[in-house]
Image: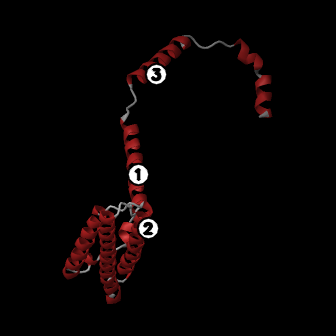
Amino acid sequence: MNRLEEIIRKGRGQFDDSEPSDGHFERFSYKLATRLHAGLARKRSIVPYLLKAAVVTLLVTLSSLWSYDHFIRPNIRTTMSLSQVSPEYREVEKYYVQQVNLMENEFSSINLTNPDQKEILMNELESMDSAYIELKKELRANPDDQRVIDAMIKHYQTKVEVMSYILEQLKQIKAEAETDNTGSHEEVTI
């Protein structure tokens, strides 16, 4: 850089007294005007920007769907029901699900005056269901294991038996309470 500065300092006299050639300013003005005019005439297209935005949106959407499928709802893919094993087991599962639904409807028709008892009953049924969910996961891991299939059927049988027993007890208590209420005016909570 020092050498360039030295050359400029030595030749400064030659640069200061020289004028540009004739027509220089006109040529410069013409070139400037044509470049400005060409820049205004050539408008920038928005299409490349829209394509880039569409690609980014597509990538974000696909990655979101993949993340949802693999991380947010993994339980759907980790369980398997009896109906997925064979048509015979589908019928068995359908029968027991109908029985359980009927008994749940009967539970709702019996008025339990004590909300704590109803809550305890619902918690017990939910704990039985959580055990069944674990069996469904085990079936997904071992779909041909007859022990798991038998355990799932046994679970349904046990649930129906337990619900039947509870319903019988509740009906019996309700009948006793109604008999006591007709004989005396004491209120009995179930």
* Foreground of the two, 129 or 117: 117
Q: Earlier in the sequence, mark 2 or mark 1?
A: 1
User: SS of the residue at dot 3?
Assistant: helix
Find the distance from the CA under tag 2 to the CA under tag 1.
Answer: 49 Å
Name the residue rendered at 46%, 19% in the picture.
Answer: 36
Tell whether 1 sits left or right of 173.
right
Q: CA distance from mark 3 to mark 1?
A: 40 Å
**Quarter where residue 154 is shown:** bottom left
Q: Position of residue 157 (x, y in %)?
A: 30, 81
Name the N-terminal-most of marks 3 and 1: 3
Q: Amino acid at mark 1?
A: Leu
State the residue position of label 2: 120
Q: Amino acid at mark 2?
A: Ile
Q: How is the image coloured?
A: secondary structure
Q: Amino acid at mark 3?
A: Arg
The secondary element bearing badge 1 is classed as: helix
- The residue wearing badge 3 is 35
Say what secondary structure mark 2 lies in: helix
Residue 124 sits above or below residue 56 on the image: below
**Residue identified by numbered label 1:** 59
Residue 74 in sight from this viewpoint? no
Pointer 2 with pointer 1, Cβ within 8 A: no
Q: Pick the residue in front: 80 or 53.
A: 80
Residue 37's place in the image compared with 144, above or below, is above
**For this rendering, which residue is in front, 35 or 24?**
35
Q: Are marks 3 and 1 in contact (CB under 8 Å)?
A: no
Tell me, yes or no, if residue 55 can be seen here.
Answer: yes
Image quadrant in which the C terminus is located: bottom left
* Residue 152: quarter of image: bottom left
